[in-house]
Amino acid sequence: MDLQTSLLPSMAPPQANSGEESKLSPSGLPIREIPGGYGVPFLSPLRDRLDYYYFQGVEEYFRSRVARHGGATVLRVNMPPGPFLAGDSRVVALLDARSFRVLLDAGAVDKRDTLDGTYVPSLSLFGGHRPLAFLDASDPRHAAIKRVVMSLAAARTPRHVAPAFRAAFDAVFDAVESGLAAGGGVEFNKVNMNQMLDFTCAALFGGVPPSKAMGEGAVKKAVKWLIFQIHPIASKIVKPWPLEDLLLHTFRLPHFLIRRDYADLTSYFSAAAASILDDAEKHNQIPRDELLHNLIFLTIFNAYGGFKIFLPHLLKWLARAGPDLHAKLAAEVRATVDNDVIITVSDVERMPLVKSVVWESLRMNPPVEFQYGRARRDMVVESHDAAYWVREGEMLFGYQPLATRDARVFDRAGEFVPDRFVGDGEEVRRLLEHVVWSNGAENGAATEGNKQCPGKDMVVLVGRLMVAEFFRRYDTFVAGVVEMPLEPVVTFTSLTRAGAGAGGARA
Ligand code: HEM
């Protein structure tokens, strides 16, 4: 059990908003009623959805409510999509580093069907199966599937990720350079998007990539399938906003529109992952069909819900940091690896600044910003200054960027500090406890009994390879950054090839 969560079954919780205030929590904090509220049924969740997406934006939505309640970071709020897609929009929001940790404690929260928050996509999108990420850690199927995924990640990460990433990196930056040579800026996100599915498949399975096996349409089909799952929580895709709200947030997109695309994806994956499926079947670990749909889910969800978001954030911070940091990174990379070899896991392990920059980017912008879980029983949740009763079955929700930018844990918490995690001393270890993008501490590990991401080491490696390959190839760069809800749009305007010097060969 996590230290921040005290399960106190013997103490009866007060009724929500009853005005009752009582006792002290085990660490001596006053136990208070959770401030905030849910307003008028149906109308308030609707109004809150518009604030959240269009009138305030996500960060302001939370910050304004924290301010309204005297700085309290545990609050009752509605979360979108609300009517008609979600039956119940009411959550207890945990908006500081301390209370957030409850969500990482498999003993405290039940995470069945909570991946996307207050609504659950139709299981027909996943061949009728409930993917691993939607299973609670206590479900026996969770352990069985996670075991297979953890061994896949462990088998592929050390040797296959680096060459697969190098191929994707070369393709992306060859395209960016040609675009720059043709004049004008080049949007990284678009070029990267075309490579992320091939890359994730090559990293996990090898063999023929989807773009070759399925043709140009592979990316479109994969992205379309993802949109069918997450449209209720997506925004700024369709204009004008009232039309978007109607199309994306009010009803489920009909499944028949995606059936054929998903069938094509399924036949690609059943060939690409055949040896893993055979192996699991041979050892009677999990039915072939269920594993197949799990592999489709984890590959596409992480290509487009993970890497596609993570890499632009990383480049955004590098762009903003400017030439001094670029020079330090280039010096570290070039002192560690020779020109033109594929940079490996052990190479990047010897690059302390590169490692720190990647962790700092994951701290500032955890690619998956929202975590949810239902309280397994009545309990007290502690924030820094107060404690709160939560009742069994209540939906807990954490907006992670507020937790990982908590000034009570990190100095200059809202700033990107490139060398924050350099070294392996006690202080760095303590801080890494609070880098939780993987739904667990950065110095923890995925297990069959927790909900931490089994791709964690692979993701961190990809970030390090991105920085290392980049600063071996380039001395510095300039890019414009426009923040958008899902990921920043990064547009390169100049790339200076290694050794080209000021004003030298720029792409
Ligand atoms: C940048 C890329 C990635 C990000 C940001 C990411 C993030 C996450 C997060 C936040 C969770 C927990 C979700 C929740 O329950 O609230 C998770 C779970 C999971 N991730 Fe990742 N992930 C990434 C890449 C990968 C990769 C490459 C794999 C493939 C091995 C993977 C496989 C999974 C699986 C199977 C789960 C469910 C774990 C469980 O239910 O116990 N992820 N990931």
Image (spheres, rainbow, N blue to C red):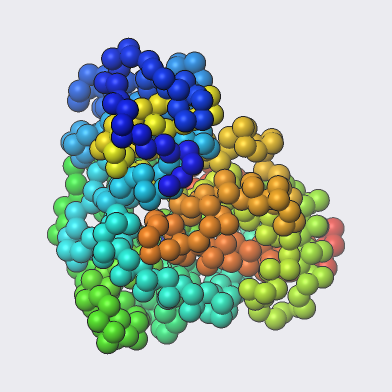
Q: In the depicted view, which residue is nearer to us: 128 or 72?
A: 72
Is residue 385 among the parts visible in the rendering?
A: yes
Q: Which one is nearer the viewer's eye here, 252 or 145?
A: 145
Q: In the rendered image, which quarter is residue 83 located in?
A: top left
183 relative to 135 in the view: left or right: right
Horizontal and vertical percent position of residue 82: 25, 34
The foreground one among 76 and 193 is: 76
Q: Residue at x 46, y 62 (%)?
A: 446
- Residue 199 in picture, x, y percent from top left: 48, 72
Instruction: Give above or below for 93 relative to 166.
Output: above
| Numbered label tally | 0
Q: Residue at x 63, y 73 (%)?
A: 345
Question: Residue extending furthest top?
Answer: 19
Q: Residue at x 53, y 57 (%)?
A: 444
Please provide percent x and percent y for residue 281. 26, 83
Residue 403: percent from left, percent from top: 52, 38
Report the side of 130 relative to 497 (left or right). left
Residue 214 to residue 473: above or below: below
Q: Is residue 61 visible?
A: no
Residue occupying the point 30% across, 25% down: 13
Nearer to us in this view, 376 or 103: 376
Answer with the quarter of the image where residue 225 lies: bottom left
The image quadrant where one finds ligand 1 is bottom left
Locate the C terminus by quadrant: bottom right
Q: Residue furthest right?
A: 501
